[in-house]
Amino acid sequence: MIVLALVAQGRDYGLAMEEFVERARMRLWAKIGTSTIYKALKDLEADGCLTSQREDAKRGPGKKVFALTAKGREELASRIADALSSEESVYSDRIAGLVFSLSLGRAEASTLIRRAIDGMELALDGVRQEQVKQAGNPMASIILDFYTAVYEAERKAMRAVLQANPEA
C-alpha cells in the first residue's frame, strides 16, 4: 500500500520515495525497510500495478520513473479500504513483557519495568522533539500524537504494575 500511495502522490522513483520516507520518519509508524521500496516497485510493476520509463541522464543510466496503472489505482483503493477496516489488534512487545515480568520475581521485574519506564521517557522526549520539528505538518502531528498516546498508555500500565506490586 505504501509504495502505491507514494507513486500516487507523485513520488515516482525509488530514491524520491526513500528520501520522503526518511524525511517523514515513516519508519516510526510503518514497516518499511530500506530495500522494501525497490522490491515492491519491481513486484508491483510485474503485477501490472505500475508502469515505468527510464529518464535520460547526463551520466549513467537514467532513473526509472513509475506511474500507477488503472489496476494499480484499484489495488491502492482496495488496500486502503482493507487497512481502514482492519480489526487487527495492536500488538506491543512491551505489554507482553509487562504481563509476564513478574514470573521473573518481583525484584527483577521491578528493575526491568523501571528501566522500561526510563526508556519510555526517552522515547516520549524524542517524539516531542519531532513534534516541534514537524510543526505545521498536520499528518505528522496526527501520527506523532498517536505515538505519544501509545507511549503514555504503556508507561501508565508499567507504573500501575509497580504500584499493584509494591514489593516489585
Image: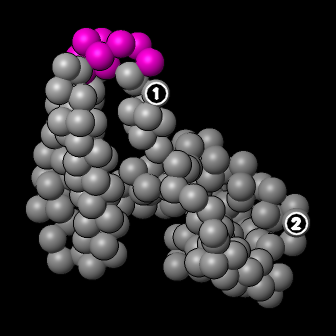
Which residue is label 2 attached to? 47
In this orientation, which residue lies closer to the viewer: 140 or 88? 88
Identify the mark at residue 143; answer none if there is no mark: none
Relative image position of residue 12 (x, y in whole percent): 58, 70
**Could you say whether the residue bearing mark 1 is in a helix, strand or loop?**
helix
**Which part of the image, by quadrant, shows the C terminus?**
top left
Above or below: residue 49 compared with residue 38 = below
Give the color scheme: rainbow, by chain, secondary structure or one colour. Answer: one colour
In this orientation, which residue lies closer to the viewer: 24 or 104? 104
Q: Residue at x 66, y 82 (%)?
A: 81
Q: Earlier in the sequence, mark 2 or mark 1?
A: 2
Q: Read off the magenta span.
A: 103-111
> Mark 2 or mark 1: which is in front?
1
In this orientation, which residue lies closer to the viewer: 111 or 118? 111
Tell me which amino acid carries mark 1.
Phe
Tell me which amino acid carries mark 2.
Asp
Which residue is label 1 attached to? 100
Q: Residue at x 87, y 72 (%)?
A: 48
Above or below: residue 120 compared with residue 124 = above
Q: Is residue 144 shown to the viewer in this render? A: no
Residue 108 included in the magenta stretch of the image: yes
| For residue 24, side relative to residue 168 (left or right) | right
Q: Residue at x 53, y 77 (%)?
A: 10
